[in-house]
Amino acid sequence: MATCDVCGNAYRNSFTVTQGVVTGTFDSFECAIHAMAPRCAHCQCAVIGHGAERDGVVYCCEHCARHARG
């Protein structure tokens, strides 16, 4: 039984996620998203869908990308 890196819950159905060289153990997708999802450069929400990337900067949507660029 592994322990979640985010909430500390020991859970028999925990899982690991690897992103590049970073690996985390989680008890839910919620905790995995909290720990590993990129954040929008404008509104800071977790980008869990496609999002938008402009000049290497990640945004949650086109609206934030346009707004941040002025």
Image (cartoon, rainbow, N blue to C red):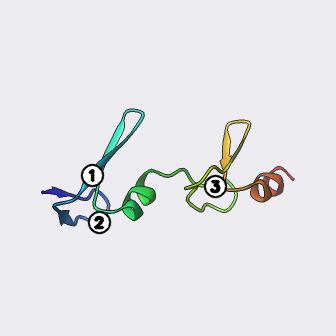
Image quadrant in which you'd find residue 31: bottom left
Residue, disc 1: 15
Image quadrant in which you'd find residue 4: bottom left
Q: Is residue 47 above or below residue 17?
A: below
Separation (CA) of disc 3 from disc 1 = 25 Å
SS assignment at label 1: strand
Residue at horizontal 74 percent and vertical 36 percent from the top: 55
SS assignment at label 2: loop
Q: Please count the marks in the image.
A: 3
Residue at horizontal 22 percent and vertical 66 percent from the top: 9
Mark found first going from the N terminus, 3 or 1: 1
Residue at far front of view: 13
- Whether residue 31 sits left or right of residue 41 in the image: it is left
Q: Position of residue 67 (x, y in %)?
A: 82, 57
Mark found first going from the N terminus, 2 or 3: 2
Task: Look at label 1 and name its amino acid.
Answer: Phe
Separation (CA) of disc 2 from disc 1 = 14 Å
Q: Where's the N terminus, which quadrant?
A: bottom left
Please tell me how crowded label 3 is: few (under 14), some (14-19), or many (20+) other residues with Cα within 10 Å.
Answer: many
Please tell me how crowded label 2 is: few (under 14), some (14-19), or many (20+) other residues with Cα within 10 Å.
Answer: few
Residue at far left of view: 1
Label drawn at residue 40:
3
Q: Position of residue 23 (x, y in %)?
A: 32, 41
Please tell me how crowded label 1 is: few (under 14), some (14-19), or many (20+) other residues with Cα within 10 Å.
Answer: some
Mark closer to the observer (3, 1): 1
Q: Are marks 3 and 1 in contact (CB under 8 Å)?
A: no
